[in-house]
Image: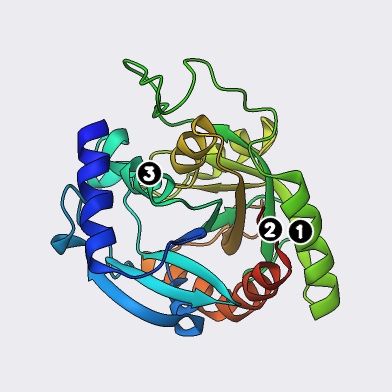
C-alpha cells in the first residue's frame, strides 16, 4: 500500500501546484461546495493512478484543487462506498493520499437519515461521535509507518474545530444540531425496525459512508470535522418512502448552509 500511496501522491504533485492544507470529502448532493473554490486544477478519478471510480449518481468523480477562504484545499467531488463493491482499503485510499500530500485537516460531509423527533429534512448535524456497523478499515496487517495497531478513538472528531464550528454557525444565524452518526453498509435504506434499533443504541443519524474515512484519518493522527445533512427522517410517524433522487434533492437544498459554515470555518482556522 505504501508504494501505491506514494505513486499516487507523486502523480498529483506533478499535475498540480501548491500543497493542500485541507482535504474535503463531499457527500451525496453536496458537490456544490466546489463552486466556492478558486479552482487551480481538476483531475478526474479515472486519470489518477490507483484511484477507484465513483459509480453513484450525485458523485461526479473529480479531485478539485484550489483555494477556499485563503486555504489551499483538495476536494473529492464524490466519494467511494462499501456497497459499490470496493474494499475498505479502496474506499479510504484517498485519505491516505491526502495525508501524504500534507493536509492538516480532513472535512467530511454526508447525507443521512435523521433519528430525532426535532429533526427536519434539510437540517445540519455536526458529528460529535460515531458508531461503526461497517467492517473496520484497519482490519488486516497494520502498517506502522501509517499509524499504530490500536489507534485511540476517544476524540474521533476534533473538539477544537467543533467548538469553532458552533461559533461560526451562531454568527451566521444557521441552526445546527449535534449528534452521533451511525455507519451502515447499505445500499438499502433502513426499515422502520432498523431505524428504531439504530436510535436505541445511541444514533442520531444514519448513513452509508464517512466512518471508514474518519477511522483511517485518525489512524494517521489527522484531525477531522464532519457534518451531516438530514435528507430523510427515520422517526416514527415521519417515515415515508424515500428514493436516492430525493436524498440528492434534500442535500442540495441544504448545501448552501453547509457551504457557508465550511467557508467561514476555514477562514478562522489557523494551522501551525
Where does the image place residue 267, in percent across and percent down from the top left?
68, 73
Label 1–label 2 contact, CB within 8 A: yes
Is residue 5 in sight in this rendering? yes
What residue does disc 2 label? 125
Judged left or right of residue 159, residue 19 is left
Measured from the top left, where is residue 253 in percent x and y? 55, 80
Left or right of 147? Residue 5 is left
Residue 234 is left or right of residue 6, and the answer is: right
Dot 2: few (<14), some (14–19), or many (≥20) neighbours within 10 Å?
many
Distance between the alpha carbons at the discs numbered 3 and 1: 24 Å
Residue 225 in picture, x, y percent from top left = 62, 52
Which residue is label 1 attached to?
177
Q: Which mark is residue 186?
A: 3
Image height of 113 relative to 204, above or below: below
Q: CA distance from mark 1 to mark 2?
A: 4 Å
Q: Is residue 1 visible?
A: no
Q: Which badge, 1 or 2, is on the more N-terminal residue? A: 2
Amino acid at each position: 500500500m505504501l508504494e501505491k500511496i506514494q505513486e499516487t501522491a507523486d502523480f498529483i504533485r506533478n499535475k498540480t501546484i501548491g500543497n493542500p492544507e485541507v482535504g474535503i470529502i463531499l457527500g451525496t448532493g453536496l458537490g456544490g461546495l466546489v463552486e466556492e473554490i478558486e479552482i487551480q486544477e481538476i483531475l478526474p478519478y479515472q486519470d489518477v493512478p490507483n484511484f477507484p471510480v465513483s459509480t453513484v449518481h450525485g458523485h461526479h468523480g473529480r479531485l478539485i484543487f484550489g483555494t477556499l477562504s485563503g486555504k489551499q484545499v483538495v476536494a473529492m467531488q464524490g466519494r467511494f462506498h462499501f456497497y459499490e463493491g470496493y474494499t475498505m482499503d479502496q474506499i479510504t485510499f484517498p485519505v491516505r493520499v491526502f495525508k501524504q500530500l500534507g493536509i492538516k485537516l480532513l472535512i467530511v460531509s454526508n447525507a443521512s437519515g435523521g433519528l430525532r423527533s426535532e429533526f427536519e429534512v434539510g437540517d445540519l448535524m455536526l458529528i460529535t461521535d460515531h458508531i461503526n456497523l461497517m467492517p473496520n478499515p484497519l482490519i488486516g496487517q497494520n502498517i506502522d509507518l501509517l499509524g499504530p495497531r490500536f489507534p485511540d478513538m476517544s476524540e474521533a472528531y476534533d473538539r477544537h474545530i467543533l467548538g469553532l464550528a458552533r461559533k461560526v454557525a451562531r454568527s451566521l444565524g444557521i441552526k445546527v444540531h449535534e449528534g452521533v452518526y451511525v455507519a451502515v453498509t447499505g445500499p438499502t435504506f433502513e426499515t422502520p425496525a432498523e431505524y428504531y434499533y439504530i436510535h436505541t443504541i445511541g444514533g442520531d443519524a444514519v448513513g452509508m459512508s464517512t466512518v471508514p474515512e474518519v477511522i483511517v484519518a485518525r489512524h494517521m493522527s489527522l484531525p477531522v470535522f464532519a457534518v451531516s445533512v438530514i435528507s430523510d427522517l427515520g422517526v416514527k410517524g415521519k417515515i415515508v418512502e424515500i428514493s436516492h433522487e430525493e436524498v440528492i434533492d434534500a442535500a442540495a437544498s441544504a448545501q448552501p448552509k453547509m457551504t457557508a459554515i465550511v467557508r467561514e470555518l476555514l477562514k478562522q482556522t489557523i494551522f501551525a
